[in-house]
Image (spheres, rainbow, N blue to C red):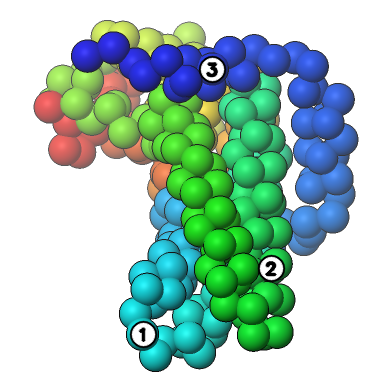
Amino acid sequence: MKLLPPLGNLDRLEDAAVLDPVVNLLRDLANTVIQPQALRDVLHGVPIGHPLHPVAVQVPIGAWVSASILDFVPGQRRAAAILTGVGVVSALPAVVSGYTDWSQLHEQQMRLGLVHATANALAEGCYVVSLGHRLRGRRVRGKAWALAGLSVVGFAGLIGGHLAYRQASGANHVEDVPHRVSPGWLDIAGLDDLSEGRLEKRVLGEVPLVLLRRGSEVDVLAGLCSHLSGPMDQGSVVGEDGDSCVVCPWHGSVFSLDTGEVVHGPATSPLPRFQTRVVGGVVQVCLPGAG
């Protein structure tokens, strides 16, 4: 089945460089205003292990859909007005979480994300107007504006689906690693071939890994960032609360070398961590659950 013609425009929006001045301005604003890092981690969804934004949008969308349904049920005028207001208020945290995620994406994703955000802002405006009419007793106008807002929300959701599934923003980019690595212990490098305290890249089959030698011990993680596949071997090693961590060079996600867990976002999924041992001067790795 062919793609619906209007949806082909979404692909073209990805390459619309004319949007870049606005994108760059809003990105810099987000990275300046949304602080500290602990707040950014919560808004990214680090504590729950996946992006917060898709969860946060359920409340306003659910409230607005319910309000429009109740608009056609006799005697539910007050309930519909309350749900409209709930949607207007609950959209704010959804906006902030989405804005935080958006500020740490690739250029093509940010361009389309700007259109997504603009559509959502227009929908929010429709519902604010709808609520105003409802509070003034103008029921027909209130319903009409709500239906207009719901239509725009649907369009914005379509773009959001494109961002999430077509462009893989927010997806775990190392989910496939256990399925592409053979089970058991596998040779990866000679211990003497690894420089002390320096991130190095090795490839296991077709799977890139990042290695860090610390004396006779070697830490090995999946070599691509779970956020957007940044090359972890080009990152840096830092200390974080007494833990040695590796920082992605693209968007600054921080991962524990000891566990692979996310210490700071925008990444929300951990990096697969390989067990290691040295046999006869050769570093061997094993990924639990591989294959």
Residue 35 in view, yes or no: yes
Image disc number at residue 128? 2
Q: Quadrant of residue 191?
A: top left
Amino acid identity at mark 2: Val
Q: Amino acid at mark 3?
A: Asn
Residue 54 relative to residue 118: left or right? left
Tell me the residue at 64%/85% (across/down): 137
Q: Mark number for residue 74? A: 1
**Residue tagged 3:** 9
Residue at screen point 51% across, 58% down: 147
How far is disc 3 from disc 1 in space, using C-alphas?
Answer: 41 Å
* Residue 91 image offset from top left, x and y in percent: 60, 65
Q: Nearer the viewer, residue 215 or 8?
A: 8
Count residues near mark 3 (Cα–Cα under 10 Å), then give few for <14, some for 14-19, many for 20+: few
Q: Nearer the viewer, mark 2 or mark 3?
A: 2
Q: Secondary structure at mark 3?
A: helix
Q: Quick check: can you spot residue 106?
A: no
- 62 to 5, vertically: above or below: below
